[in-house]
Image (cartoon, grey):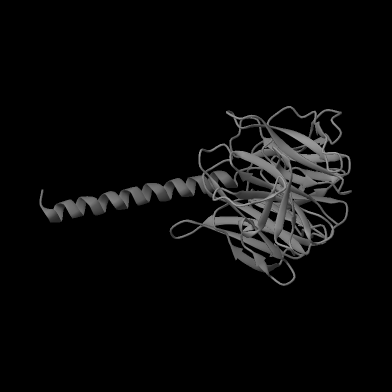
């Protein structure tokens, strides 16, 4: 076969593969627009972050509003969902300010961004992300936001992974791009290592204190940090994705109980005594839980028979009770108002 014929065959093959890929994309898009029987319904409408008595979350139900930020009355989360035009992989809001971690196809790779939005979901600031979004939090005042991305690897159980966690002042746009630059005091001593990773920030009401997970040396630690001093200090071991209670006396977190299978159990840690309380949820929870109030936690678990959809569940924070479904096909909840 001559060189010109080889080039012609190659060009035809590229065109054929491109056409097949285009058909697959169109078919996938068509499937995503189709609702499924029994799924929660959503209708377009106005979603505002200062609406009291409402719960916002990312809609996971199949259909045209999949991935959209939606809201429902917090007393009747099974009602039809009001769908906004904002699409997020992760979302959190407090005091009328939200952070949306979005991902869209780019020319060569995914275009991942963190968007700071106001109560009307208008974008105030945008920041490029260095990896896949995984955690997001806004401080109680709305003055700070934090996010974590995976820079490499696919999960906490992977052999090699790296995270990058950032904190931004939502008022000024001042960005701390990487908590790994903060001073670390580990078990009472200054610490520095090349394998440090941070994830899962949760904020105090004082607009300076935060808690997060530090991973290093094949161990995870709960650390207490100061934004102004750019420092963190370890408090306890085997703590991941902490979430500070509204009364700021406890931290909910996932505790690794089986190293090989990446199995976590939800616990609550008393910050004064460092006593831990396992919760009645016995399934493995890979999420940063949200306190709905001082007594109740919400978190996401994979939906039955699905690999890319989660349901929101709740459980009492004192170890009693039974887990129950809060909202099917949902993730990243926030109490509004």
Q: Residue furthest bottom?
A: 172
Residue 70 x, y percent position in the rendering:
73, 52
Residue 23 in the image: above or below residue 262: below
| Front residue (pair 207, 73) | 207
Note whether residue 13 is visible: yes
Residue 248 x, y percent position in the rendering:
86, 49
Q: Which residue lies furthest to the front in this view?
A: 189
Task: Residue at 53% x, 38% y: name it.
Answer: 158
| Front residue (pair 226, 22) | 226
* Quarter-of-image position of residue 32: top right
Tally the numbered discs.
0
Task: Residue at 73% x, 51% y: name it.
Answer: 233
* Residue 118 horizontal side relative to residue 135, left or right: right
Quadrant where the C terminus lies?
bottom right
Residue 210 in the image: above or below residue 259: below
| Front residue (pair 143, 325) | 143
Residue 48 in the image: above or below residue 324: below
Residue 43 in the image: above or below residue 36: below
* Residue 187 horizontal side relative to residue 244, left or right: left
Note whether residue 68 is visible: no
| Front residue (pair 285, 64) | 285
* Quarter-of-image position of residue 252: top right
Residue 5 x, y percent position in the rendering:
15, 52
Q: Which residue lies furthest to the left in this view?
A: 2
Task: Residue at 84% x, 51% y: name it.
Answer: 54
Residue 81 x, y percent position in the rendering:
76, 48
């Amino acid at each position: 076969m001559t060189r010109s014929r080889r080039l012609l065959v190659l060009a035809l093959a590229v065109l054929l593969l491109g056409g097949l890929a285009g058909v697959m994309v169109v078919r996938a898009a068509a499937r995503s627009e189709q609702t499924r029987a029994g799924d929660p319904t959503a209708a377009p409408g106005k979603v505002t972050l200062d609406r009291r008595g409402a719960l916002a979350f990312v809609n996971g139900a199949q259909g045209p509003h999949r991935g959209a930020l939606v809201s429902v009355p917090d007393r009747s989360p099974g009602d039809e969902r009001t769908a906004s035009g904002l699409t997020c992989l992760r979302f959190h809001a407090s005091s009328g300010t939200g952070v949306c971690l979005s991902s869209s196809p780019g020319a060569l790779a995914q275009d991942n961004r963190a968007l700071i939005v106001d109560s009307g979901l208008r974008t105030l600031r945008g920041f490029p992300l260095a990896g896949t979004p995984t955690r997001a939090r806004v401080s109680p005042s709305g003055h700070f936001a934090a996010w974590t991305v995976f820079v490499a690897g696919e999960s906490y159980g992977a052999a090699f992974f790296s995270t990058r966690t950032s904190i931004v002042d939502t008022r000024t746009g001042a960005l701390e791009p990487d908590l790994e630059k903060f001073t670390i005091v580990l078990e009472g001593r200054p610490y520095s290592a090349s394998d440090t990773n941070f994830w899962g920030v949760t904020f105090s009401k004082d607009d300076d204190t935060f808690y997060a997970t530090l991973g290093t040396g094949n161990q995870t630690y709960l650390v207490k940090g100061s934004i102004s001093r750019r420092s963190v200090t370890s408090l306890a071991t085997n703590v991941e994705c902490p979430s500070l209670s509204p009364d700021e006396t406890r931290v909910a977190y996932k505790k690794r109980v089986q190293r090989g299978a990446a199995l976590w159990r939800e616990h609550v840690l008393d910050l004064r005594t460092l006593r831990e309380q396992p919760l009645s949820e016995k399934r493995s929870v890979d999420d940063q839980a949200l306190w709905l109030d001082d007594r109740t936690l919400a978190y996401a678990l994979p939906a039955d028979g699905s690999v890319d959809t989660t349901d929101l569940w709740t459980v009492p924070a004192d170890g009693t009770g039974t887990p129950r479904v809060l909202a099917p096909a949902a993730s990243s909840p926030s109490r509004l108002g």
